[in-house]
Image (cartoon, rainbow, N blue to C red):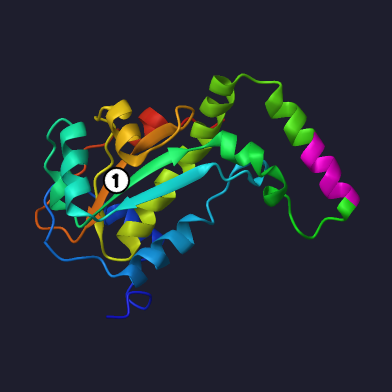
Amino acid sequence: MNTTEQSLSVRQAIEKRHSIRTYKQEPIPQQDLNKIFELVRLSPSAWNLQPWRFHVVTDNDLKEKLEEAAYGQKQVTSAPAVVVVTSDMEDVLANIADTVHPGLSPERKEEEVANLSGFFNGMTVEDRAQWGLTQTNIAFGFLMLAVQGYGYSSNPMLGFDQEKVRELLNLPGHVKFAGILPIGKADSEGYPHHRFDLEKIATFH
């Protein structure tokens, strides 16, 4: 199946997306995972720092341990793939030159690296980690739309023991969690949308 040709429009992906908790037991082809993350990596971030990191879990034993860390929520093992979305600002700072646009002159690149390093080194590890998390949440939204656009379903999760997940994935203590996203072909229907009216959420000045 050529998923690229059959992908949904942005509007269709938004309208069709529901949180799904039961999935068909069909592996997601690596090609489809690659296509999804090729789109997600285009997510915007301030200063192009791209602090998001995606840990894609397909191993059944590890998914069982993740389910336990997620307080027994069965969608973790029902889904053929589970994405743990994290933010790592310390890795960003260690490789800050990689975020600077290659089209800049060497002098301009040096200036950018110095400015960014000075700004973030003036913050605590915790403060810059929280800053990075706000950027990673943007990519989390892009991820859900990319998943839906390629014909898969998902369910964003924040209910899990972060320290257990950190240990399972061998992540350093400074890494922040944006959430967990089980993905796969839906084997159940989500609840109908129940959202506030436009007048409740949008004020036009």
162 vs 79, nearest the viewer: 162
Q: Amino acid at mark 1?
A: Leu
Residue 63: percent from the left, percent from the top?
20, 47
Quick check: can you spot residue 191?
no
The residue lying at 14 percent from left, 48 percent from top is 77
Left of 159 or right of it: where is 169?
A: right
Task: Report the magenta residues as a range.
Answer: 107-114
Q: Is residue 56 visible?
A: yes
For residue 105, above or below residue 128 = below
The image quadrant that residue 167 belongs to is: top left
**Quarter holding the N terminus?**
bottom left
The residue at 68%/42% (across/down) is 47
On the picture, is 157 further left or further right than 35? left
Task: Name the residue at the right extreme.
Answer: 107
Foreground of the two, 194 or 104: 104
Picture layout, residue 5 above or below residue 153: below
Q: Position of residue 186 (x, y in %)?
A: 15, 58
Magenta-colored segment: predominant secondary structure? helix
Place residue 197 in its image quadrant: top left
Q: Which residue is mark 1?
A: 181
Who's the residue at 11% across and 62% down the image?
A: 25
x and y percentages locating residue 96 in the rendered image: 69, 43
The magenta stretch spans residue 178: no
Residue 194's place in the image compared with 151, above or below, is above
* Residue 147 placement (x, y as % from top left): 33, 58
Quadrant containing the C terminus is top right
Give the structural element (helix, strand or loop) at label 1: strand
